[in-house]
Image: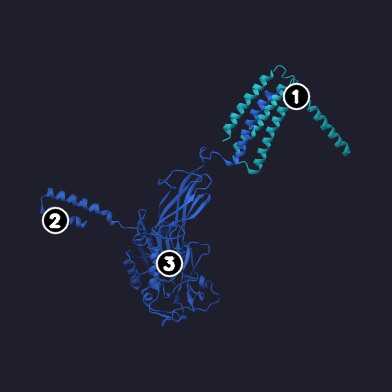
């Protein structure tokens, strides 16, 4: 707006008013035509999130976690820092979401600002957006209930921390074994990247477990079998409820609409202190100069914000063997070819997805044909099969769900008709006796009538 | 008891045979023709029981041609027999002409239905 007014001022001063009005309207038109390029947001063509809202308890987190935030910014995200109880907080305006991702680094918040509450956060996730929740020893009920809605249960005891007397991180300051060095990662190249994380990850915080009935949540970093969740400053009166590898330190959940959620019990895991410090595992006594926190957090946030592991399947085509255009209907026992293209988002562009376990079903109430698709390594998957001997309305179904990847679910309907009466074989071999009997009867009748007439 | 029943059966069979040999030759020819048609129909039914009824229309067509022509031959025999009071005034040529015409129609239908 200031640019426009400066332009008009110079124009009006230098020339006469008439010519200036012309130049003014042309410049307005030029500026308006550039406006579409100013909108750069999450869209189907580019699934990586762009605008992230970061909610903090206090702004000192901006400096104590500065390495994490600056790495996010360098990957192209627009971070918007706000206090969690800021009254002007809003996730959406006029029905449109203002952000593509939400990072909750505010474990002790009791109530969010006016426009945000548990239901609003859950609606945000239900509309396909991503979420990172980091809890702490001071986690409030609100944060714990957000986690429960996502399928993860934090320990109910508010003073319990994860303690491990065998795989704790050796440190000069803290001797109560609450800072643990965890290296029990999930085996998945999609979620944690191809490079193996050598050094263990430093963790100090509360424990959570995954609800057994939930099939969508995964443990990305589990505690070792010797860990348990208890109050470090008081004696244990009864055995702890959460022990061993059921304790999850970092969990992720991929919802059915492909929204990704990360829940962890330690805000310190993201801090500069943990990123920079070295790690020595008390049990194995190997000393690493740098903990695995920075690599772990960077790779996991790449997965969470859809820079990796996001698939799309496009261009479903099918045709009869030998032809090229798609028919509106098939006949039973036809041979047909089926094509689909599957691409994976690499963070910047769509790359061909290469796998040997994608399958297509020819489905009517149950799959009559199930074939594994073969790929040409450039993203095109195809197969050939014979239409079964049943007529009806079928669907080509591609249902693909793999650990860490978005789920693909495509279906295309196609009717299948039976033979027309002139498409059967002309003479059916099993019916030859009947043909023979009819002709024999005709011959018999002919001979009989001769014999009967000329019989004296 | 058994011996008397078997003797009775034999006596019955012999009396039937002697009565039958008294019928005129033309009737015996018709009876032979009916027997041939029914036999062909039975063979087809046994074949269908073994193989299954896949081209059902062909099966029906084959069996119907045999059964139909047997029925028409029986009608011919009834109409030609002088001892039947019902058909006293019917000339036997007319009966034979009916027989031929009906058989022609029957075989036309069979050929169409055979597939």
Q: Is residue A105 visible?
A: no
Pick whichever of labels 2 and 3 is earlier in the sequence: 2
For disc 1, the marked residue is: B24
Q: Nearer the viewer, residue A36 or B115?
A: B115
Q: Nearer the viewer, residue A438 or A217?
A: A438
- Looking at the picture, how far across and down is residue A247, in whole percent? 50, 71
Q: Nearer the viewer, mark 2 or mark 3?
A: 3
- Residue A10, disc: 2
Residue at 65% across, 43% down:
B50
Q: In the rendered view, how is the structure colored?
A: by chain
- Residue A341, disc: none
Residue at 49% across, 49% down:
A386
- Looking at the rendered image, the quarter that the C terminus of chain B falls into is top right
Q: Is residue A101 visible?
A: yes
Residue under mark 2: which chain is it in?
A: A
Q: Secondary structure at mark 1?
A: loop
Q: Secondary structure at mark 2?
A: helix
Q: Nearer the viewer, mark 3 or mark 1?
A: 1
- Residue A189, disc: 3
Using the image, determine if residue B59 lies above or below residue A263.
above
The residue sitting at the bottom extreme is A172
Q: Which chain wears cyan?
A: B
Q: Which chain wears blue?
A: A
- Looking at the rendered image, the quarter that the N terminus of chain B falls into is top right
Q: Nearer the viewer, residue A45 or A259?
A: A45
Labels 3 and 1 positioned on one and the same chain: no
Q: Secondary structure at mark 3?
A: helix
């Amino acid at each position: 707006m200031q640019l426009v007014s400066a332009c008009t001022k110079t124009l009006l001063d230098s020339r006469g008013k008439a010519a200036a009005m012309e130049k003014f309207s042309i410049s307005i038109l030029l500026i308006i035509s550039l406006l579409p390029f100013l909108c750069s947001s999450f869209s189907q063509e580019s699934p990586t999130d762009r605008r992230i809202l970061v909610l903090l308890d206090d702004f000192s987190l901006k400096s104590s976690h500065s390495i994490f935030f600056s790495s996010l910014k360098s990957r192209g995200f627009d971070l918007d820092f706000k206090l969690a109880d800021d009254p002007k907080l809003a996730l959406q305006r006029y029905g449109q979401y203002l952000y593509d991702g939400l990072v909750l680094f505010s474990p002790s918040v009791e109530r969010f600002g006016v426009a945000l509450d548990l239901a609003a956060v859950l609606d945000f996730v239900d509309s396909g957006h991503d979420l990172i929740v980091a809890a702490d020893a001071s986690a409030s009920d609100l944060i714990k209930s957000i986690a429960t809605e996502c399928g993860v249960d934090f320990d109910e005891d508010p003073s319990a921390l994860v303690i491990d007397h065998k795989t704790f991180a050796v440190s000069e300051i803290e001797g109560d074994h609450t800072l643990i060095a965890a290296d029990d990662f999930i085996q998945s190249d999609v979620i944690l990247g191809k490079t193996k994380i050598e050094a263990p990850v430093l963790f100090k915080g509360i424990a959570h477990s995954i609800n057994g009935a939930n099939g969508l949540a995964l443990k990305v970093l589990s505690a070792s079998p010797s860990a348990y969740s208890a109050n470090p400053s008081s004696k244990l009166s009864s055995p702890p409820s959460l022990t061993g590898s059921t304790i999850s330190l970092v969990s992720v959940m991929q919802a059915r609409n492909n929204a990704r959620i990360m829940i962890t019990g330690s805000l310190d895991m993201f801090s500069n202190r943990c990123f920079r410090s070295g790690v020595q595992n008390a049990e194995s006594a190997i000393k690493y100069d740098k903990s695995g926190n920075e690599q772990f957090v960077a790779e996991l946030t790449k997965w969470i914000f859809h820079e990796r592991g996001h698939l799309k399947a496009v261009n479903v085509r099918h045709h009869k063997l030998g032809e090229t255009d798609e028919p509106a209907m098939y006949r039973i026992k036809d041979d047909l070819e089926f094509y689909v293209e599957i691409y994976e988002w690499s963070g910047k562009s769509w790359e061909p997805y290469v796998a040997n376990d994608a399958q297509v079903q020819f489905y009517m109430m149950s799959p009559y044909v199930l074939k594994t698709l073969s790929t040409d390594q450039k993203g095109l998957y195809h197969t050939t099969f014979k239409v079964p001997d049943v007529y009806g309305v079928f669907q080509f179904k591609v249902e693909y769900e793999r650990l860490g990847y978005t789920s693909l679910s495509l279906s295309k309907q196609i009717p299948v008709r039976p033979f027309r009466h002139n498409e059967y074989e002309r003479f059916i071999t099993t019916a030859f006796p009947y043909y023979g009997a009819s002709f024999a009867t005709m011959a018999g009748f002919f001979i009989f009538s001769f014999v009967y007439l000329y019989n004296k | 008891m058994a011996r008397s029943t078997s003797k009775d059966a034999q006596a019955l069979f012999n009396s039937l045979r002697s009565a039958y040999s008294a019928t005129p030759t033309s009737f015996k020819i018709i009876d032979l023709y009916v027997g041939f048609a029914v036999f062909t129909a039975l063979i087809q039914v046994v074949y269908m029981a073994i193989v299954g009824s896949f081209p059902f229309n062909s099966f029906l067509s084959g069996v119907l041609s045999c059964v139909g022509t047997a029925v028409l031959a029986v009608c011919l025999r009834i109409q030609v027999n002088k001892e039947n009071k019902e058909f006293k005034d019917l000339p036997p040529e007319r009966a034979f002409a009916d027989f031929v015409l009906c058989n022609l129609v029957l075989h036309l239908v069979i050929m169409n239905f055979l597939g």
